[in-house]
Image: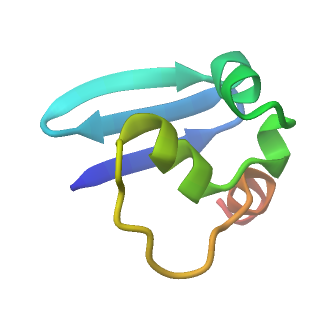
Amino acid sequence: MTVLSFDKTGVDVVYEGTEFRLEKELIEEATEKSYHDVTDHEVLQIVEKNPELSGEPARVGDILSTA
């Protein structure tokens, strides 16, 4: 299971027991979108090759506004 924790400067990730951080700039470069317009599903696809995507994707901007 992959855990994503979003904040205004990037995402803390736990993937297969390994913890690392994806900075906002890296996510924007990989998706060619503004960080706030990227979805949690898109970040998960950066981390995992074939992730199981469930539920509706949530924009990072929406996630941060409810945190």
Q: How is the image coloured?
A: rainbow
Q: Describe residue 39's horizontal placement relative to residue 40 as left or right.
A: right
Classify residue 27 by image quadrant. Answer: top right
The tally of labels here is: 0
Q: Describe residue 28's horizontal placement relative to residue 45 as left or right.
A: right
Whether residue 4 is situated above or below residue 47 in the rendered picture: below
Q: Position of residue 43 (x, y in %)?
A: 55, 44
Classify residue 24 by image quadrant. Answer: top right
**Quarter of the image where the C terminus is located:** bottom right
Whether residue 56 is situated above or below residue 26 in the rendered picture: below
Name the residue rendered at 52%, 24% in the picture.
Answer: 22
Classify residue 54 by image quadrant. Answer: bottom left
The outermost residue toward the bottom is: 55
Name the residue rendered at 74%, 21% in the picture.
Answer: 29
Name the residue rendered at 72%, 34% in the picture.
Answer: 31
Q: Describe residue 41's horizontal placement relative to residue 2 as left or right.
A: right
Q: Position of residue 47 (x, y in %)?
A: 40, 36
Whether residue 29 is situated above or below residue 49 in the rendered picture: above
Q: Describe residue 31's horizontal placement relative to residue 34 as left or right.
A: left
The outermost residue toward the front is: 50
Q: Position of residue 21 (x, y in %)?
A: 44, 22
Name the residue rendered at 71%, 66% in the picture.
Answer: 66
**Quarter of the image where the N terminus is located:** bottom left
